[in-house]
Structures are given as structure tokens and as C-alpha cells.
Image: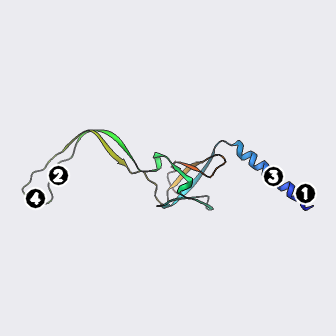
Amino acid sequence: MADAAGLVEKIKRAAIEAQEAAKPVHICFGEVVCEAPLRIRMEQKLTLGERQLILTGNVMDYVTTVSADWETTAQEDAGAETSAPHIHRITGKKQVTVHNGLHVGEGVVMIRQQEGQKFLVLDRTGGRV
């Protein structure tokens, strides 16, 4: 009888694995629990580390190039009483850093890699999960 129970359990497990393999995408949600190193908790039972996470530009700091054509606002020089207000013109292509990294408490939406333990972190959910 013990062999029959083991066989039934193996059949159940095989059916579940076959069903999971048929799903090309598994969407899941998590919450950032640590920024450095990045850790995201899923469904309060599994915490993912940096090695398991693939980040998009929506959830990480990155450098990009922008075209600029603007002037700074007039400001008094803080330490000099005799200096006049001054304006700076900024033109051309400039590199800027977009500070888009995740913070503790933010909710995220992820896609699990099929048959794997890698998760693509797509974006924030707009609040705690």
C-alpha cells in the first residue's frame, strides 16, 4: 500500500509540473525589504536576492543622454554681498542620472522565468503589496 501512495504522489507532482511548464509567464508581486543588497519578499514566504533578480530601467538608477536648452534661474551668490545675480545657459547633449532605484516598502510586479528561479522586476505597483 505504501508503494501505491508513493506512486499517486509522483503522478500528482508530475501533473503539477506539466501544468506549470505549460504556462509561458507567471506574474507575481513582491515588496522590497532591503535596498543594498536588493531583496524582495514574495507572498511573505520567499525572499529573492540580487542573483535571482533581473531589473528593468523602471526600477533601477541609470545614466542617459538628454538634449538641453534652458537657463538657470537668477540667484544671489550666497557669500558675497557685492555680487550681482547671475544666470547660466545650458545647451547641447548632456548626460544625466535617473534615480529610479527601488526603496524599502515599495511593491513590485515581476515575471518569473519559466522553469527557473530568475525574476524580471518590471515596475512598481504604486504601493505596498
Of mark 3 and mark 1, the one earlier in the sequence is 1
Q: CA distance from mark 4 to mark 3?
A: 79 Å
Q: Secondary structure at mark 3?
A: helix
In front: mark 4 or mark 1? 1
Disc 2 marks a residue whose amino acid type is Gln
Q: Give left or right: position of 3 versus 34.
A: right
Q: CA distance from mark 3 to mark 2?
A: 72 Å
Q: Is residue 26 above or below residue 49?
A: above
Disc 4 marks a residue whose amino acid type is Ala
Residues at circles 3 and 2 in contact by the CB criterion of under 8 Å: no
Q: Secondary structure at mark 4?
A: loop
Q: Secondary structure at mark 1?
A: helix
Of mark 3 and mark 2, the one earlier in the sequence is 3
Characterize the local packing of mark 4: few (<14), some (14-19) or many (20 or more) Cα atoms within 10 angstroms.
few
Q: Position of residue 12 (x, y in %)?
A: 81, 52
Q: Is residue 67 visible?
A: yes
Of mark 4 and mark 1, the one earlier in the sequence is 1
Q: Quadrant of the N terminus?
A: bottom right
Of mark 2 and mark 4, the one earlier in the sequence is 2
- Residue that appears at 32% across and 44% down: 95
Residue pointed to by mark 2? 75
Residue pointed to by mark 4? 80
In front: mark 3 or mark 2? 3
Characterize the local packing of mark 3: few (<14), some (14-19) or many (20 or more) Cα atoms within 10 angstroms.
few
Residue pointed to by mark 3? 12
Residues at circles 2 and 1 in contact by the CB criterion of under 8 Å: no
Characterize the local packing of mark 2: few (<14), some (14-19) or many (20 or more) Cα atoms within 10 angstroms.
few
Disc 1 marks a residue whose amino acid type is Ala
